[in-house]
Amino acid sequence: MKKTIRNALDDGIKTLSSNNITDARLDADLLLEHVLGVDKVYIIINGNELIAEEKYNIYNNYIAQRAEGKPLQYIIGYQEFMGLTFKVNENVLIPRQDTEVLVLEAIKYIKENNITNILEIGTGTGCIPISICYNCNDVKATTVDISDEALKIAKENAIINNVADRIQFVRSNLFEDIDENHDFQLFISNPPYIRSNDIGDLMIEVKEHEPIGALDGGEDGLYFYREISKEVKNRTKKRSYILYEVGYDQSDEVKKILNALGYTDIKIYKDLTGINRVVAGAYNK
């Protein structure tokens, strides 16, 4: 029996709903748009158009993957962030809107303080330095990750978004392979911050598909904030700035870490839902 676009969409919604996918209608629609290479308006207007059997089978395969909990972004292979397109796969975390707050605040610091040289720790898709360089023409970035697979994706994303000539990608465990004489003016990171014991409580699509190494922040979730903050202090040549994304309940603890190490001008910024999402500070050598 031949299927129309409307039949295919209804089948997808039914399958996802029966598997308790929260945004079943939205996800089914987005997957169908992706398979057909059309937009939502086309789907609505041309619902009675017959869909090719090959396309329908591909769509059903994608629906089955989503029903099993695989994130939509990993199925279609990309995610939008800061108005840019980023390639994703299961070697990297999916960029989230919360992190846009970190990028936007970093851009403000860069423009207000004439910053031209930044270091990011833990790049994943590269969405942070790529978005910063895209919006700040004079900035050059160095970014590190311990994962070769993540760096490969990040490099591809830098090429896709036309900033590859201003970003250096380094395989490194935190600062290990970063030249100590390099004079960075701003340090930025969205480090792993989930408490180890809380990993098992995450949604299936996160804990079973996204890389655990990019999520696990140690026993209290603060391991990387302590390590990065100490190293930034040791490497600062003059006044520099540090910006972190933090978990919903971690801003006060990260502020305490920075205070204890002698950072000043510590500020906390909220995300669009009113949650403390970014902690920033300055350090004078």
Image (tube, grey):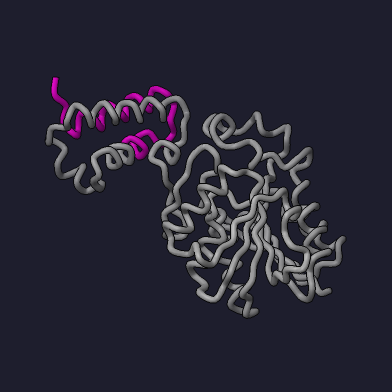
Q: Is residue 148 above or below residue 266?
A: above
Q: Is residue 256 left or right of residue 124?
A: right
Q: Is residue 254 left or right of residue 77?
A: right
The quarter of the picture where the N terminus appears is top left
- In the figure, residue 216 lies in which quadrant? top right
The number of discs equals 0
Q: Residue at x 72, y 52 (%)?
A: 174
Q: Residue 221: give x, y in percent of width and height.
A: 74, 43
Residue at far top of view: 1
Q: Residue 223: give x, y in percent of width and height.
A: 78, 46
Q: Residue at x 41, y 27 (%)?
A: 65
Of residues 4 and 10, which is closer to you in this image? 4
Of residues 239 and 152, which is closer to you in this image? 152
Q: Residue at x 37, y 37 (%)?
A: 27
The quarter of the picture where the C terminus appears is bottom right
Q: Residue at x 57, y 49 (%)?
A: 151
Q: Residue 55: give x, y in percent of width and height.
A: 23, 31
The magenta stretch spans which residues? 1-28
**Magenta span contains residue 16:** yes
Q: Is residue 249 above or below residue 62?
A: below
**Magenta span contains residue 64:** no
Q: Is residue 126 left or right of residue 47?
A: right
Q: Is residue 253 above or below residue 22?
A: below
Q: Magenta stretch: dominant SS?
A: helix
Residue 276 in view? no
Q: Residue 108: give x, y in percent of width and height.
A: 59, 73
Of residues 196 and 53, which is closer to you in this image? 53
Residue 192 in view? yes
Q: Is residue 155 above or below residue 147?
A: below
